[in-house]
Image (spheres, helix red, strand yellow):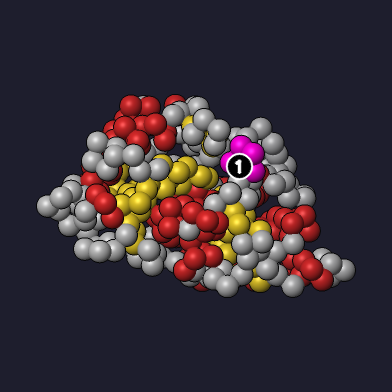
Amino acid sequence: MSELFAIALDIGGTKVEAALVDGHGAVLAGSRHRAPTGRERSAEQLADSVRTVLDGVLALIGPDAAVSPASVLGVGIGAAGPVNLAEARVSPLNMPVWDDYPLSALVADIVHPVVPGIPVTLRLDGLCITLAEHWVGAASGHDNVLGMIVSTGVGGGLILGGRTVPGPTGNAGHVGHLEVGGHEDACPCGGSGCLEAVASGPRTVAWANGQGWVGDTGEQLAAAVAAGDPVALRAVERSGRAIGRAIASAASLVDLDVVAIGGGFSHVSPLLFEHARAAVAERATFGYVTRLQIVPSALSGEGPLIGAAALIHRAEMVG
């Protein structure tokens, strides 16, 4: 097989996934592996999950295997944050036992015996998603992009002038912790009124519960919205407008062409996008803000892996 590959690793609050991704952004069939993460797991259990998925990928690499070691360019890691790029460590809020954890070193120890010396590149998962959207997704053809994930949390990443903007610590673009006006919802980061605390899937469901709606999941809320439930409709409006306000604030600061939004809760209803766009449109005096497009992700559930692989395949863009 002559194609060049990246090993992609995506680490989130509920699962870790790994796969081989080619230079066109396609996941190699049969290479995708998943294992659980989660707040309840110990640091070593989380590390074991990383080993499990990487071992599954590495089983496909070797002199007599499907993929030659010489055709593997590197490992790209997208991780929940915050991250510490200088020391290649992570401190994910939703996995507190991994406070300042040396993730890149762990991955290198697992991978290098099979593929010696290849680079291991770590970035915030939201930045990886943005790279994926720019490469093969909804932001293709645009060089000033905010990528967003609205799911259990709210994450993001920035591409400006055709290059990623990680910031000095690697945490630039963390749009989920912009504070949105009119809300005092407490956030685990220590702030109040953060977008994640207002508009994430679990927080939106919790708000609806507080208004009398009975249900437990974003999927149930979506069904209630489709059925015209007034509380569910207000909950989605509240979330969508908060997303729009955060986007408008970000665009006022850095000037954007497009915002691509993915993640499980982004599918709750098309109304989520309508309310976000309406909130941005209120900045009528700032044409450079209202010109931006807010679009749904064009990627499937493979998007985070594609984005992690882009750290290797699109290395020229990675700041």
Look at the picture and state if 163 lies above or below 296: above
In the image, residue 1 sits, relative to residue 35, either above or below, namely: below
Relative to the observer, which residue lies in front, 152 or 60?
Answer: 60
- Magenta range is 167-171
Q: Is residue 29 visible?
A: yes
Q: Residue at x 38, y 63 (%)?
A: 23
SS at mark 1 in the image:
loop
Work out which residue is located at the far right of the displayed protein and give it.
285
Seen as rendered, the residue at the extreme left is 64
Q: Position of residue 97 (x, y in %)?
A: 44, 26
In percent of the image, x 12 and y 52: which residue is there?
64
| Image quadrant assignment for residue 4 | bottom left
Q: Position of residue 116 (x, y in %)?
A: 29, 39
According to the picture, the residue beneath numbered tag 1 turns out to be: 171
Q: Tell me if 213 is positioned left or right of 281 in this view.
A: left
| Residue 292 quadrant | bottom right
Q: Is residue 251 magenta?
A: no
Residue beneath the point at 21% across and 56% down? 67
Identify the image quadrant of the N terminus.
Answer: bottom left
Residue 289 falls left or right of residue 21? right
The chief SS type of the magenta part is loop
User: Looking at the picture, how far across and down is residue 186, in whole percent?
Assistant: 66, 38
The x, y position of residue 115, in whole percent, is: 27, 43
Number of marks in the image? 1
Amino acid marked by disc 1? Asn
Residue 245 visible in the picture: no
Is 168 inside the magenta-drawn segment? yes
Instruction: Characterize the local packing of mark 1: few (<14), some (14-19) or many (20 or more) Cα atoms within 10 angstroms.
Output: many
